[in-house]
Image (cartoon, rainbow, N blue to C red):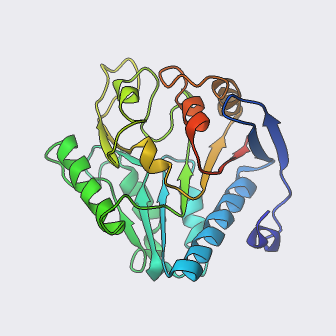
Amino acid sequence: MTEAAVQRDIPEPTVLHWPAPGGEVRVLSFVSKADAGAYVADVIADTLQAAVADRGKALWIGCGGSTPKPIYESLTTLDLDWDRITLAQVDERFVPTDDTNSNTRMMREALEPVLDDMDFMTLIQDLSSAQACADKAEARFLELGGGAAPVFDIALMGMGPDAHYASIFPHHAINGEVYGTDRIVLPVAPTDGSLEPVLPRITLSVPALNRSRKIIFFITGATKLEVLRSASQSTDPLESPIGAFLAQCPAPVEFVWAA
């Protein structure tokens, strides 16, 4: 546990683990979602403060969806050097930022108390086309990296019940490109509606995600735990995106789960 987590008196988790082709998968299992979320928030806060202390600034990426929203809200209650912290998105639906499907909207609402200080970068930079949007988001990341792909201090990520992560879904054509591209940001075409994604999306590439110093997945529910257990046994990106990601990821990956 982190020092901050101990101070907040978060119960110790149970450690679940099993072998996988990419190495042992370890999951910190908490009794409640609140305890799990508090732990994740503390890990992020400690990492960001350490980055600010070491390098004068911190850059991190976060996912959307309903699961991480309480984490963002919890972070705003902590005394961090927000004016030295930049948050960007792992992925986003290609919709206006005020749309009900927009994760940008959710993240802005959750982080509202600190947005006057923290720099928040949405991936939605241009609504004329998904490719133009990805191109402009790529340019923003290159600015953040001083002309090169940036290094992220920590990535907060999630996993869907179909074993997708970011906007990298099973049986999608993007899997043939997203692992070996030089791009930081890619557009993701929608499917015919029979599989996700139903809406067009923008995602960070796998090489970009691999530039994270630390990655933490926060998942909830018995179904997702069993999906992770099963999917981690396969490294086929078409069948098991999360298993393929774990098999090749050079960064430390931690899973946090609660029912």
* Residue 196, image x, y percentages: 40, 27
Residue at horizontal 70%, vertical 33%?
225
Vertical order, 177 against 44 (above or below): above
Left or right: residue 147 compared with residue 87: left
Residue at horizontal 20%, vertical 42%?
131
* Residue 88, image x, y percentages: 41, 60
Vertical order, 255 against 226 (above or below): below
Q: Nearer the viewer, residue 191 or 109?
A: 191
Quadrant containing the C terminus in the rendered view: top right
* Residue 166, image x, y percentages: 46, 41
Which corner quadrant of the image does residue 42 belong to?
bottom right
* Residue 214, image x, y percentages: 60, 56
Can see residue 64? no
Which corner quadrant of the image does residue 24 belong to?
top right
Q: Residue furthest left?
A: 128
Can see residue 32? yes
Which corner quadrant of the image does residue 206 belong to?
top left
Q: Nearer the viewer, residue 235 or 257?
A: 235
Residue at horizontal 32%, vertical 23%?
191
Q: How many marks?
A: 0
Left or right: residue 227 compared with residue 163: right
Q: Nearer the viewer, residue 200 or 16?
A: 16
Residue at horizontal 30%, vertical 49%?
99
Vertical order, 225 against 142 (above or below): above
Quadrant containing the N terminus in the rendered view: bottom right
Left or right: residue 14 compared with residue 187: right
